[in-house]
Image: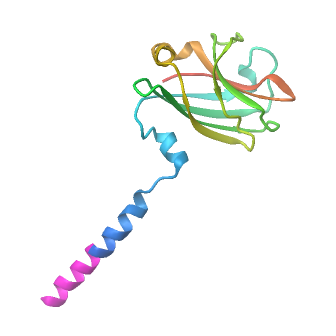
Amino acid sequence: MKKMIFSAAAILLLASFSLPLVNEKSEVEKIRIGVNGGAMLSAEMSGAQESGIGDPDGMGYVELVLNQGQGTISYTIEVANIDPATAAHIHIAPPGVAGPVVVGLSAPTSGMSSGVVEVDKELIKAIRQNPGAYYVNVHNPAYPAGAVRGQLSK
């Protein structure tokens, strides 16, 4: 009986050391799942969605977590089949129309970028209320107006 109790105690002790390791998340994962809370929006990006001529082979995906209370937007951008990116933004405009930049994001120069930006709470509210009026695009020298674009949605 003592051996069984000792074995059970040893298993529990080992489990207590390994559980935090299983639950640890990288900074990118924290951003991706919105550890700070907020509304999640996303978009699939392609060159075909650009209002001008985008990269016909380009594709990508963006996830945003809008936290109005904190005045932040957390984001992860992934792109493929485009030349190295030089800029990324959130713009306001309906599909097929180019619009002004409302939020600057880090360019996914190596195919991926992520971060947290401070944004006016009223702008976050507007994006949350009407995500389809906003889009994210990624620029590069070959496509300075935008290589890939995706209209935001819930």
Q: Nearer the viewer, residue 119 or 125?
A: 119
Up-down relation of residue 12 to residue 69 (above or below)? below
Residue ID at (82%, 23%): 144
Residue 12 rendering spot, x and y as whole percentages:
26, 73
Up-down relation of residue 8 to residue 93 (above or below)? below
Q: Residue furthest left?
A: 1
Q: Nearer the viewer, residue 60 or 116?
A: 116
Asked whether residue 5 is drawn in magenta, I would say yes
- The answer to whether residue 146 is left or right of residue 65 is right
Residue 11 rendering spot, x and y as whole percentages:
28, 77
- The answer to whether residue 44 is left or right of residue 27 is right
First to last magenta residue range: 1-12
Q: Dominant secondary structure of the magenta stretch?
A: helix
Residue 76 rendering spot, x and y as whole percentages:
59, 37
Query: In which quadrant of the rendered image does the N terminus lie?
Result: bottom left
Asked whether residue 135 is drawn in magenta, I would say no
Residue ID at (78%, 38%): 81
Res 14 → quadrant: bottom left
Residue ID at (63%, 34%): 61
Residue ID at (47%, 25%): 71
- Exactly how many numbered labels are in the figure? 0
Residue 57 rendering spot, x and y as whole percentages:
79, 33
